[in-house]
Image (cartoon, rainbow, N blue to C red):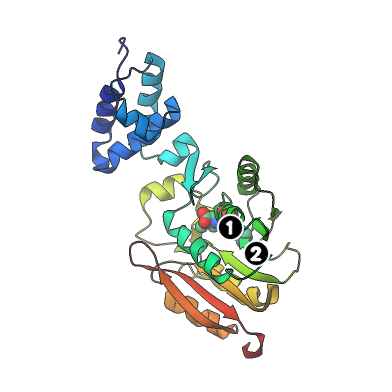
């Protein structure tokens, strides 16, 4: 194209190219155009007769081709919103999922009456859970860890961009390199997909970091490691909240019970799947 194309024409070209995404195509095109024009979605839609430069149009076509090849939009534009916070994401970190906001909501309920809670986020990835909690609880002292230095670097950058400085970041294989300090709350969204899970979407397996997704023992190995050690790092009556696979609630509940947790409760995600389990530590029953 050598003439200046309008936003409307450009959107039509993009939607046509991404037609296999169905209703999602329009949303994806808007995300890509937003990142190129720095206009809000509302402005792009309300003033769609406005013209783009040829460079902007060509850039859009390049991004649409990447999306058509299967790359997630969040990696293409290097951004994903979580808990209304704009987070940088690269292929080193898992793209934060809407379902994980349930874990944040549950954590805020548990901490409702704590003045200066001490929180530990295991396997922080982009930092999404720790950052969401830090944004809601400025008085909290948050520790976050990941085994991957690349993840920690992104998480740290996100904290800096958001001006959230009540989090300390640690490179650690779960608890191994963490300061032994009793926490009011431990949260984690660990890898929980079984190695041979047929439901693991090809696009996820191809683009997202495998170390963030897969766990041994039908996906339960990391959940079990965390449950086994969490009591040593929790205050008496402290809480543990875990995200897990939608068919893993029973095994997670039973592991929690065996390790001295009670008040075990599982919550369902937006699709009605059992997704997050919470429990309270009681050393007397361990
Ligand atoms: C499912 S991702 C979750 C990331 C982020 N918390 C979120 O909710 O989007 C799991 C994270 O755990 C980290 N991880 C995997 N094994 C680990 C281990 N042994 N110790 C610490 N972190 C680990 C991965 O690098 C990854 O960032």
Q: CA distance from mark 1 to mark 2?
A: 9 Å
What x and y, as percent, mark residue 83?
49, 52
Q: Position of residue 212 (x, y in %)?
A: 52, 55
Q: Residue at x 41, y 62 (%)?
A: 196
Callout 1 environment at 10 Å: few (<14), some (14 to 19), or many (20+)? many
Label for residue 281? none
270 relative position to 216: left or right: left
- Binning the other alpha carbons within 10 Å of mark 2 as few (below 14), some (14 to 19) or many (20 upward) gives many
The residue pinned by badge 1 equals 133
* Numbered label tally: 2
Query: Could you tell me which residue is drawn at 44 percent across and 53 percent down?
Result: 97
Q: In the image, which disc is placed on residue 119?
A: 2
How far across and down, in percent of the image, does residue 2 sit? 31, 9
- Percent position of residue 68, x then y: 33, 35
- Establish if 107 lies above or below 51: below
The answer to whether mark 1 and mark 2 are in CB contact below 8 A is yes
Left or right: residue 63 compared with residue 109: left
Q: Which quadrant is home to the C terminus?
A: bottom right
Tell me if I can see residue 174 in this picture.
Answer: no
Q: Is residue 166 visible?
A: yes
Ligand 1, by image quadrant, is bottom right
Towards the viewer: 101 or 45: 45
**Residue at horizontal 30%, vertical 13%?**
1
């Amino acid at each position: 194209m050598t003439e200046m194309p309008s936003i409307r024409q450009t959107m039509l070209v993009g939607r046509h190219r991404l037609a296999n995404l169905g209703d999602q195509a329009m949303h994806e095109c808007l995300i890509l155009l937003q990142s190129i024009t720095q206009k809000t979605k509302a402005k792009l839609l309300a003033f769609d007769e406005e013209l783009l430069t040829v460079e902007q149009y060509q850039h859009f076509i390049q991004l649409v081709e990447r999306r058509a090849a299967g790359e997630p939009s969040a990696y293409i534009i290097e951004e994903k919103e979580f808990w209304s916070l704009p987070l940088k994401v690269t292929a080193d970190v898992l793209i934060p999922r809407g379902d994980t906001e349930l874990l944040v909501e549950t954590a805020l309920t548990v901490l409702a009456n704590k003045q200066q809670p001490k929180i530990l986020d295991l396997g922080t990835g982009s930092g999404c859970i720790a950052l969401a909690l830090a944004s809601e609880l400025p008085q909290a002292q948050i520790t976050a860890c990941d085994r991957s230095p690349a993840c920690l670097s992104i998480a740290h950058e996100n904290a800096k961009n958001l001006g959230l400085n009540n989090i300390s970041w640690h490179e650690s294989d779960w608890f191994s390199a963490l300061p032994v300090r009793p926490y009011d709350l431990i949260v984690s969204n660990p890898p929980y997909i079984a190695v041979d899970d047929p439901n693991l979407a090809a696009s996820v397996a191809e683009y997202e970091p495998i170390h963030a997704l897969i766990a041994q023992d039908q996906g339960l190995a990391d959940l079990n490691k965390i449950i086994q050690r969490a009591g040593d790092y929790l205050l008496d009556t402290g809480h543990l909240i875990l995200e897990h696979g939608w068919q893993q609630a029973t095994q997670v509940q039973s592991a929690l019970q065996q390790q001295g947790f009670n008040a075990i409760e599982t919550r369902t995600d937006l699709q009605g799947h059992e997704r997050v389990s919470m429990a309270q530590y009681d050393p007397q029953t361990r």
